Image (cartoon, rainbow, N blue to C red):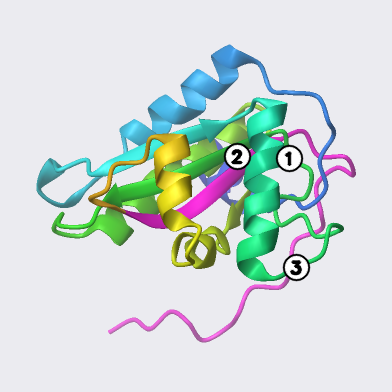
Amino acid sequence: MSNEMLNLIRQRRSIRNYEARQIPASDLDAILEAGCYAPSAMNEQPWRFTVIQDSEVRSWFLQTCRRALHKDDDFDPFYGAPTIVLVSAKKDAIAPQCDASLAMENMFLAAASLGIGSCWIHCVNDVFASPEWEALKQRLHIPADHISVGSCILGYSAEGLPAPKPRQEGVIVKF
């Protein structure tokens, strides 16, 4: 493909091993802005992006996740990524999960365009369904009327880009 965007889509990979260095604030702002420009049902824009970069807050959140998921101290569902973006949406929106998922995809593509790795981390939904949820909402200023959709981790790959996996065949049907 010769189109830049189509090439970017084909080349983007989920990164599961990160360097400790933080991404620049200007790049983070550009990635978050890309999320804000995602399409949404009736243009409701029901998403909220809660960014965790502070090492103390990240450590607290990681420990909370471990407790909620009943995992040991070696478990890091965020693969060492220095930035975690929790994506939530107003639960009474027309299509909150779809809208917030589109926003996350915009963020993944924006990150890739800046040479920043990313990965969807879904287990936060299990954490947000746990008894720890109320404490999380309060500490992270997530509105009570929001549901968790997932999280987007961001950082620099410690190993480069993984090789692409084969694409499934037979998933396109034309009439």
Mark 3 or mark 2: which comes first in sequence?
3
Where residue 124 sits in the image (x, y, percent)?
Answer: 54, 58
Q: Is residue 163 above or below residue 158?
A: below
* Residue 167 on the magenta span: yes
Q: Amino acid at mark 1?
A: Ala
Secondary structure mostly taken by the magenta-highlighted segment of the chain:
loop
Report the residue at 70% width, 29% height from top: 56
Q: Is residue 37 left or right of residue 130?
A: left
Kindly identify which numbered label has been placed on residue 34. none
Q: CA distance from mark 1 to mark 2?
A: 7 Å
Secondary structure, mark 3, is loop
Which residue sits furthest right? Answer: 159
- Secondary-structure class at tag 2: strand
Look at the image and say whether residue 98 sits in the magenta stretch: no
Q: Residues within 10 Å of mark 2 (few under 14, many from 20)?
A: many
Q: Which residue is mark 1?
A: 81
Q: Which residue is mark 3?
A: 71
Report the front residue among 45 and 2: 45
Which is nearer the eye, 44 or 4? Answer: 44
Question: How far is the residue under mark 3 from the one under mark 1?
Answer: 18 Å
- Disc 1 + disc 2, Cβ < 8 Å: yes
Asked if residue 69 lies left or right of residue 172, the reply is right
Determine the residue positioned at 56% across, 46% down: 152
6 or 153, which lies in front? 153
- Give the magenta-colored segment's residue range: 147-175
Question: In this figure, which residue is indicated by the disc labeled 2?
Answer: 84
The kind of residue on which mark 2 rests is: Ile
Q: Amino acid at mark 3?
A: Lys
- Image side of residue 129 versus residue 78, left or right: left
Q: Position of residue 35 (x, y in %)?
A: 39, 36
